[in-house]
Image: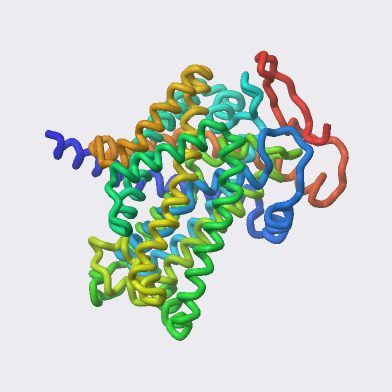
Amino acid sequence: MLEATEMWVASISDFLWTYLLSIILITGGIFLTVRLKFFQFRFFGHVLKQTIGQIFKKPDEKGTITPFQAFTSALASTAGATNIVGVPVAIALGGPGALFWMWMVALIGMATKYSEIVLGLKYREVSKDGTWVGGPQYYIRKALGWNKVAALFAFSLMIVIIPSIMVQSNSISTQVEGAFGWSTSISGIAITIMVALIVLGGIKRIGKVTDKVVPFMVLTYILVCSIILIVNVTELPNVFSLIFVHAFTPISAAGGFAGAGIAQALRWGLARGLYSNEAGLGTAPIAHSAAQTDHPSRQSLWGIFSVFVDTIILCTFSGLAVLSTGAWLDVDVNDASNMINVAVGSVFGDAFGGSFIAVFLLFFVLTTIGVLVFYGEKQAEYLYGLKAAKMMRFVYIGAIYLGAIGGLQFVWQFLDLILAFVVFFNIIPVLFLHKEIRAITEDYIERIYKGKGGDPKITLFVEKSAKGTEKKASSDR
């Protein structure tokens, strides 16, 4: 009975992600890209200037955490295991061409993530504890009046955080067990304690941790992968040929690779790309809504940059590493998650390869789970209040240990299925609000980018105080 249920859930999830959601997210991303007049491409230089060019700037605007802390908090929930494990799996099942389609979905995903963060900031509120909160549930309710859809989004995300945390903690506990021989129980206790110390300090402590750990881990991973590519630099022309050619033509079986058709390259590239950068999922606005900023679009530029870092940079380095070293041919498809270990080990030695990936994942998983707990708490707070949010915090902390030891694995089967509903409840409202997104973007371009100044032609922020009184205010107050 349980096996039949798992197969049923898996088949439904596969259908939703392979067809329905992929089509909605891709066409939606293209639609938003066109509606915004290719904003993410036309202003990419400006994006870099306003993001990495402003890292050390101390903002003096309303918000709870700095723009950079909001960015690293949001990035922490996407970067890590998916970039390291997900990319090799996509290549193993879809061939080198899958990497090309990951790039394509990232380019249009930039517009989607930018759009949802814009809305999250416009409709954010000040909660009873004095922190700024926002996300899809707020703009769905305030902008569209879809109260039930807002509640369904919040409830679905609150629930899906539980199996998501379990999968994350299990991935690192098994990696640590393989690399250092620690039992999953011991590593589970250690991970639970470390995450608890982070999340008990709220979004301010999470931001302070992520703005130090995430950049360090990203740069370290890029450095290691760069060394691998330098050692195998003569293979790179052939690697890029494989990527571009087999994005549009089938590739035959070779070594441990079973071969793949165009449809498989497209399916796995799009699926992993969407899953990696989470554009359209609705989680990024939750973190970015706490940022100190003077305009929704200014902070939303970090959303464009996060997709670039997550998919265009990190996923690309992972893909090039496993392709240039030949790990994608040497490792069996059933063990594809270990491809990056093999790639790193081919240059630095097998012992370093396993240990490095284990340590890298450990730090990223700690920050990922910490941010996930914050996301879940905010949904509970929206639905049931602050007391419920604090109760859910301990439910999530308990899920860390259960996941680490492999407990309640049947719950994990529902992760992709519930996640599909979360995406659906978010992306449809975002598309309905395309006129607001475009108006806010045009206001930013005219008044701030072009420096024309003046009063905004639209209401840029709708705030709600802790007492529940709603007011409208412009960005330049």
| Drawn side of residue 408 relative to residue 294, left or right | left
Q: Position of residue 108 (x, y in %)?
A: 54, 54
Q: Reply above or below: 265 against 153.
A: below
Residue at the (64%, 49%) spot, across then down: 302
Residue at the (66%, 53%) spot, across then down: 39
| Drawn side of residue 443 relative to residue 306, left or right | right
Q: Quadrant of the C terminus?
A: top right
Q: Reply above or below: 32 against 374.
A: below
Q: Position of residue 76 (x, y in %)?
A: 51, 47
Please indicate, yes or no, whether residue 51 appears anywhere in the rendered image.
yes
Q: Position of residue 181 (x, y in %)?
A: 28, 55
Give residue 272's quadrant in the image. Answer: bottom left
Q: Reply above or below: 377 against 364.
A: above
Direction left: furthest residue? 1
Residue at the (35%, 63%) spot, across then down: 354
Of residue 394 and residue 131, the one placed in the foreground of this image is 394
